[in-house]
Image: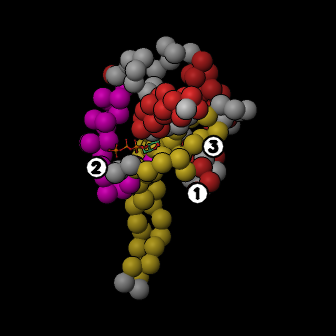
Amino acid sequence: MAERKARRDLERMLVDETAEPRALPLSLLEDITRDFSHAHEIGRGGFAVVYKGILGGDIAVAVKRLTNAFMDEMEFHREVECLMRVKHKNVVRFLGYCANRQGTMETYDNKLVMADVHQRLLCFEYIPQGSLDKYIVGTTMQPLTLLFLYF
Ligand SMILES: Nc1ncnc2c1ncn2[C@@H]1O[C@H](COP(=O)(O)OP(=O)(O)OP(=O)(O)O)[C@@H](O)[C@H]1O
């Protein structure tokens, strides 16, 4: 129920450019990326794996799952705060964030222990051909291709 509402809100945000980024439930981000499946992976950076999240129809978002080693809680808060402040037509729109912490039983040293699993995620507008180098290649290749065709 809450997940369905969050999904609708996220879809609405994509058409309403004035909407502020918001907290998103982990269950929604898991659902739209098919549990962060390999098939949804669109890229990797130094600190994150980026997935394509599919909402209704053709609507997509980019979900950035930060690696655990990267950030402590304070750093993550600062990152979210900075992203929330930046609003510019040349900057990819930040849509939301998720910080989830869950205890799971794990075996350590032949004993069952309660481990804290942290998930930190950021959600952005999806940019087709996400990487800037693909745009640059796309634009510089065109004249070259035309030149080649001319000769
Ligand atoms: N909003 C987006 N829409 C589509 N693809 C994206 C988006 N954000 C990232 N990607 C893809 O994921 C890749 C990794 O992005 P990410 O932001 O994690 O790292 P980076 O900017 O390449 O490097 P760094 O680790 O230094 O930040 C990008 O190269 C791009 O292909």
- Tag nearer the camera, 1 or 3: 1
Q: Is 144 situated above or below 43? A: above
- Residue on which disc 1 sits: 38
The quarter in which the C terminus is drawn is top right
Q: CA distance from mark 1 to mark 3?
A: 13 Å
- Residue on which disc 2 sits: 72
Along the polypeptide, which appears first: circle 1 or circle 3? Answer: 3
Asked if the magenta segment contains residue 7, the reply would be no
**x%, y% of residue 118?**
41, 54
The quarter in which the N terminus is drawn is top right
Amino acid type of the residue that numbered disc 3 sits on in the rendered structure: Ile
**x%, y% of residue 48?**
40, 50
For image coordinates 35% across by 29% down, the residue present is 83
Nearest the eye: 125 or 119: 125
**x%, y% of residue 8?**
65, 28
Give yes or no for contact between labels 3 and 2 (Cβ–Cβ under 8 Å): no
Along the polypeptide, which appears first: circle 2 or circle 1? Answer: 1
Magenta part of the chain: 65-84
Q: Residues within 10 Å of mark 3 (few under 14, many from 20)?
A: many
Q: Residues within 10 Å of mark 2 (few under 14, many from 20)?
A: few
